[in-house]
Image: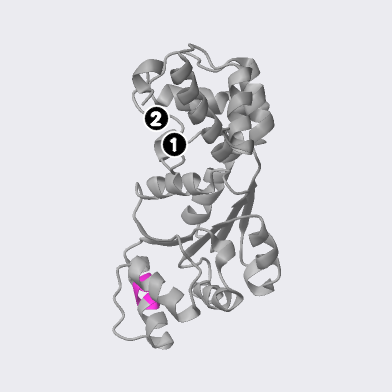
Amino acid sequence: MYLEYWGLDEYPFENVPDPKFMYYSAEYEEALVRLLYAVQRKKGAAMLTGEVGCGKTTLSRVLIQKLSEIDCDLGLITNPSLEPVEFIKEICYQFGLNPENGLKVDLWNMIKSRILENEKMDKSTVLIVDEAQLISKETFEEIRLLLNFQLSDRFLLTLILIGQPELQTIIHDIKQLDQRIAIKFHLDPLNRDEVTEYISSRLSKAGSNKELFTSDAVSEIYHFSEGIPRKINNLCDMSLMIGFISKIRLIEGMTIKKVVKDITQGHP
């Protein structure tokens, strides 16, 4: 609706996990490097946590993109709230396996065979589980068995758990799993300077060659969003739409305040 008005090629603040719009702050860069290290060095398991809307899923998509550049057998589970046997079946499906029956022992044997086959071909086996805080305790007990696939000097599968902060507590209470997670990283919200860079980065990737938000506007965005990318996207998107409707050429603090009022109180 407002692309031509603002001189944009595409919408810059969509809340979808598009790797193209990944903003590489120092912290996000470190998180990505740690996860890649876990895979490349076959560390067994890694965990990434962060508040709702902080960009974990986008980061996971960037990770998947990076892993596609190496020889890797990758599985991604985005809805892990499954019963134990169903979860194991989903692992099979993610690795292109089609179990003929639902016997747990047969499912595990299929997965083991696939992992060993990958190892013979010098191919990494990686399972990424998003929204991992939704996994039941019983299913976590099954997941722990994945890390039993190992040689004397390395794990044969890398498990990456991604979830909200409560995942830390859940894992902490499962000692045998907690002790096997070699790499843990928590994403914090963006700081004030990073919010400025985040907005500029997304605008630039969407085709803008100028700043569309004043410093005062960014301050208001930071204050209301608390540095959470999803909230930043919502504010910026609505501000650009209102700016288009009002025929203004620069988003200032008052526009952000209006958007915040609409979001928090509803438009009269």
Residues rendered magenta in the picture: 111-116
The dominant secondary structure in magenta is helix
Secondary structure under badge 1? loop
Q: Is residue 191 visible?
A: no
* Crowd rating for badge 1 (residues with CA inside 10 Å; few <14, some 14–19, many 20+): some
Which image quadrant for residue 224? top right
Between residue 266 and residue 124, name the one nearer to us.
Answer: 266
Q: Nearer the viewer, residue 59 or 114?
A: 59
The residue under label 2 is which amino acid type? Tyr
236 inside magenta stretch:
no
Q: Which mark is residue 14?
A: 1
Residue lying at 63% horizontally and 16% vertically, measured from the top left: 215
Residue with the mark numbered 2: 11
Position in image of residue 243 (x %, y %)? 49, 19
Q: Which mark is residue 74?
A: none
Q: Amino acid at mark 1?
A: Glu
Residue 17 point in image, percent of width and height: 44, 44
Assess whether mark 2 and mark 1 are in contact (beta carbons under 8 angstroms).
yes
* Label 2 packing within 10 angstroms: few (<14), some (14-19), many (20+): some
Q: Report x, y in % for residue 6.
A: 41, 17
Q: Eyeballing the image, is 232 above or below 43?
A: above
